[in-house]
Amino acid sequence: MEKLKIGVIGAGSISDLHFQSYTKNEQAEIYAVCDLNEQRAEEKKNKYNAALIYTKYEDLLNNPQIDAVSICTWNNSHAEIAIAALNAGKHVLVEKPLCKTVEEALRVEDAVKRSGKVLQVGFVRRFGTNTNVLKSFIDSGDLGEIYYAKASILRRLGNPGGWFADKERSGGGPLIDIGVHIIDLCWYLMGKPKVKSISGNTYSKLGNRANIKNLSFYQAADYDPSINKVEDLANALIRFENGASLMIDVSFTLHLKRDETSIKIFGNKGGAEIEPELVIVTEKNNTILNSQPQIDSLSFDFNQAFQNEINHFVTCCKGEEQTISPVEDGVELMKILCGIYESSETGKEITFERSNVTM
C-alpha cells in the first residue's frame, strides 16, 4: 500500500508530537519539513528522515508528491496556510485553535467545502482514552441528559512568553491556548449543543512574573519577559439553546497553591470527573456509587492521544473514516472563544445569534 506523504509546516516544539506520531504510523511517510528557520527545518529533516526541506510553505504546497500537511505554525497563520493547502489539493491537520477570528474560520470552512479535502482540527483531548471511555457511557445513556459542565486549567506560573504572549500572533492568552482544549472537550461530551449566550471576563494583573525565583515553568523558545500582551486569566459562563451550561476558568499565572486541572460533567442520571482522573458517579438502591473504570490511563495521556489523533487523520485522508474533529467544530469553537473575549471587552453578555464577533 502506498504511504501517505506528509509535509509538516512549522518545526517548533508542538511539531515533534506530529513527527513522532507519523513515524509510528505505517501508512504515513514524513516527506517534507517547512520552517522559516532553515536550520531548524534541517534539524527536523535529519531527525525524522524527511526527504525535503522548505523555508516557504508555498513551495511545499506546490510539490505534487505531498498528500497532506500538518500545520504547526503561529495561530495568526493557520487560516492562510490551511486555505492555501486546501486550494493546492492537500488534506490538512491544523493545530488548535483553527485560527484567530470567526471571519477567518468561515473562510477556511468555505475552502474545505470547495476542495472536498479533509480538514481536521487538532482537538487532541477528543482522542484521549479516558475521553472515549466516558463518551461511550454518555452515548449509551448512563448519565442521562447532560445539563452542566465545569472545567478549569489553572497554572500558577507563568506566561510562556514568546509568541504565546504576543496577541498579534497568538490571538490571546490562556483562553485561546489551553482554554480551547477544555471548552472543546466539554462541548464535545455534551453533544455539541448550539450556543445561546456567553458571559466572559479576562484579567491582566500579574504579567509573566519573571521576578519569581527557584520555581521553573514552561518557556517558549523565543521567551522574552518584556513581551506580555495577553490576559493572565479568563473565565466564562456559556449557555446553550438546550438549557445546558458550561462554566470554565483558565490561567497562565495566578496566586494559587498549585496547578489545577479539573473537568466535570453532570447529567440527570449520573455525573463524571474526567480530570484529574476518570470517575463515574451514579446511584443504585438509594446509594451513591463512585465507579472507576479499569483502563491503562485514568488521566489524559497526551502522547497516546496524539498518536490516536494522527492515526485517525491518516485513516480519514485515505477515505476510510470521517473525521471526528471537522472544520465546522473549529468554527463553533472560534465563535465561543471570540464571544468570551468580546463579552470581556464590552462588559456585556453576548447573545450568540446577534453577535458578530471578530476579535
Image: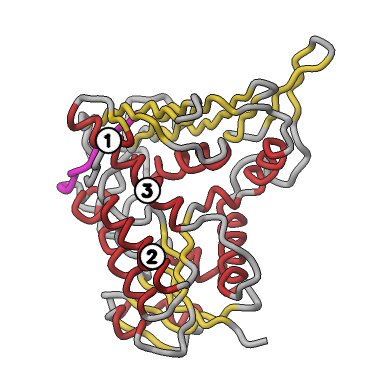
Q: Identify the residue at horizontal 59%, vertical 44% (top origin).
A: 300
Q: How many marks?
A: 3
Can you say which quadrant of the picture contains the N terminus?
bottom right
> Which residue is identified by label 2?
72
Residue 245 image position (x, y, % from top left): 47, 26
Instruction: Report which residue position mark 1 lands on.
Output: 354
Identified by mark 2, the residue type is: Cys
Q: How would you rate the neighbour count of disc 3 (Cα within 10 Å): few for under 14, some for 14-19, many for 20 or more?
A: few
Question: Relative to 313, is 230 on the left or the right?
Answer: left
Q: Are marks 2 and 3 in contact (CB under 8 Å)?
A: no
SS label for mark 3: loop
Disc 1 marks a residue whose amino acid type is Arg
Query: Is the residue marked by circle 2 packed among few (<14), some (14-19), or many (20+) residues within 10 Å?
Result: many
76 in relation to 350, above or below: below
**Label whose residue precedes the other's in the sequence (3 or 1):** 3
In the picture, the disc for residue 218 is 3
